[in-house]
Image (spheres, grey):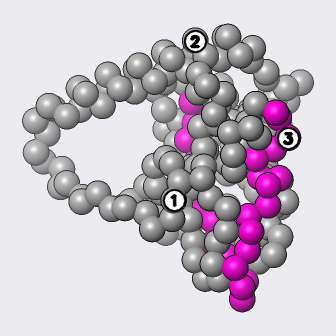
Amino acid sequence: MSIRFTAQGLRGTLAVLVTAGLALTAAGCGSGDDDKPQSPASASKESGSGPTAQEGKSEEPLAEMKGSDGLFLRITSAQRDAGGFVTVNGTLKNDGAKAVVVPAALSGNETEIVRNGRSFGGATLVDPKGKKRYYVLRDTDGRPLTTTGFSTIKAGDSLSVFMQFPAPPATTTEVTFQLPTFSSGTIQISG
C-alpha cells in the first residue's frame, strides 16, 4: 500500500505547512531567548536549495549508503516536526578519484518532479510494520522539497542534502530510507 496525494490536496497541505513554518519562524525571531548561543550562518559552496545538515549533532550517522561511481550518502538526522513531516538531513560525498555526474535517477521518474530539474525526489521512506511508503513532499508548484540544483560533484567534495516526507504515525520510529542507485538503510526518526 502506498500513500499518494492528489495535487490539489497536497498543495493545500503544503500551503498550511509553509504558513505554519513561517509563523513559527517569525515567532522565534522575537523570543528573547538569550540563554542559547547563536551560531553564525554559513554559506554552502555548492549550489542548491534547502537547509544544511544540522550543526551540533553527533558525528555518528544514522545510516551510510553506497551509490554508483564512488558516491556515498551519509544520513545524519531524521527529525519529526510538529507540522506533520519528517526532515532527513545528510551529506552526499564523491569518494571517487574523478568528478561524477550525479545520476538523474535520484530525481525519480514522476513527470511533475523530473520537469523541475535535479533533486532527491526519488527518495522514499518505508514503514515495514505499517506497510506504507512515504514519498518526498512537493510545494504548490510541484517542486520536490529536497536539495535541488546540483549536477556534478568533484572528487573528494561533498554536498549537504535534505529531503522532507509526510510523517509516519508517532509510534513509528524506524523506517527504511531508499534512494535510486543507492543501497537501502534503516534509520531512526527522532522527535
Determine the residue positioned at 61% across, 16% down: 11
- Tell me the residue at 63%/65% (across/down): 92
88 inside magenta stretch: yes
Residue 161, x across and y down, in percent? 57, 55
- Give the residue type that dot 3 points to: Asn
Q: Disc 2 versus disc 1: distance between alpha carbons?
A: 29 Å
**Which residue is tagged 3?**
109
The residue nearer to you, when weighing 61 against 70, is 70
Res 69 quadrant in image: bottom right
Residue 75 percent coordinates (x, y): 62, 59
| Amino acid at dot 2 | Gly
Image quadrant where one finds the N terminus: top right
Above or below 20: residue 51: below
Residue 158 lies, in percent from the top left, at 57, 71
Q: Is residue 97 left or right of residue 189?
A: right
Residue 134, numbered label:
none
Q: Is residue 44 magenta?
A: no
Discs 1, 3 touching: Cβ within 8 Å: no
Q: Quadrant of residue 115?
A: top right
- How far apart in space, not on screen, are marks 1 and 3 (Cα)? 23 Å
The picture places residue 86, in percent across and down from the top left corner, at 58, 36
State whether residue 127 is above or below residue 99: above
Query: Which numbered disc flags the more N-terminal residue, 1 or 3?
Result: 1
Magenta part of the chain: 85-111
